[in-house]
Amino acid sequence: MPVNPELVGRTYPPTAPYLVGREKVREFSRAVFATDPKSLDVEAARAAGHADLVAPPTFAVVVQEHTLAQLLADPEAGIDFSRVVHGDQRFTFSRPIVAGDELTATLTITSVKSLGGNSMVTAESSITGADGEHVVTATSTLVVRGEDA
Amino acid sequence: MTQLTVGETVAERTVELSRDSLVRYAGASGDFNPIHYRDDVAASVGLPGVLAHGMLTMGLAVQPVVEWAGGADRILDYQVRFTRPVVVDAASGTSVGVSAKVGALEEGVARIDLTVTVDGQTVLGKAQVRVRLDA
């Protein structure tokens, strides 16, 4: 089943707030081989003017994941998870994510294209802080393989 | 960092990935897709082996740039295209090579282009990091 082209422009409800934990930032930092003291040492982060540890750039995917789950669970989208391949990914920051942030993500589908039996879905998740200010936008293109692909 | 020139290599690193690395990333990120730790599941969906999470490759590839730039808070934008799967052997793991070059310079911002390779083949396309240079 092809991905529903009427998804374009659809915006999903904001996700429940995600509280960024200091130890989660440390755990994620180790997992991506980060060496930045601002991601590991609270004193180093504070010396640089941050309230707490600074998350590595790709940490935003942890929050974005909750929006992609909304998309995959949407029966009107018609996306078979077992056929999804991650095509590309982008993070565009207004400021870094810092431990203690309470982040909310809002997903908008910006494009659905068909290409050689596959569908390409571009999903843009705008992530904001508790103050409502933009922190980072995480954009994924998902390739949904067709039945014969 | 005022003496940067386009084409200059600013960082290089080789990261050794093992199955342990994949399990650690699964836990840290919450991505528990079994193709990243179970050979039987990977084989059943036609993959050449257990794969590293694309987001793990993306996440580790930017680290040499973060270190060079002086911290994660200097990264303004980061994008990649996933062009080739990274197979991680259960016994021997795999080596991921990262090379970071200056792709473009503008007022206070450098675009750093990453070349990320496994066994001499690139695994990420259009891997670009925009870095804030000013204090």
Image (tube, coloured by chain):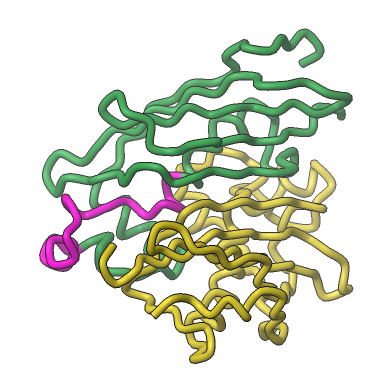
Relative to A79, say whether B132 is above or below: above
Q: Quadrant of residue A11?
A: bottom right
The picture places residue B122, in percent across and down from the top left corner, at 38, 31
Quadrant containing the N terminus of chain A is bottom left
Q: Is residue B44 left or right of residue A107?
A: left
Q: How many marks?
A: 0
Relative to A100, say whether B132 is above or below: above
The picture places residue B20, in percent across and down from the top left corner, at 26, 53
Q: Is residue A30 left or right of residue A96?
A: left
Q: Is residue A133 left or right of residue A27?
A: right
Q: Nearer the viewer, residue A10 or A5?
A: A5
Residue at the image point whose x is 55% and y is 36% from the top: B127
Residue at the image point whose x is 70% and y is 31% from the top: B70
Q: Is residue A110 magenta?
A: no
Q: Nearer the viewer, residue B83 or B95?
A: B83
Residue at the image point whose x is 74% and y is 26% from the top: B110
> Chain letter for yellow?
A
Span of residues in magenta: B38-57
Q: Nearer the viewer, residue A33 or A89?
A: A89
Relative to B109, say whether A75 is above or below: below
Q: Residue furthest front?
A: A116
Q: Residue furthest bottom?
A: A75
Q: Is residue B52 magenta?
A: yes
Q: Quadrant of residue A133?
A: bottom right
> Chain letter for green?
B
Q: Is residue B71 left or right of residue B25?
A: right
The picture places residue A3, in percent across and down from the top left corner, at 48, 76
The picture places residue B60, in percent across and down from the top left corner, at 47, 41
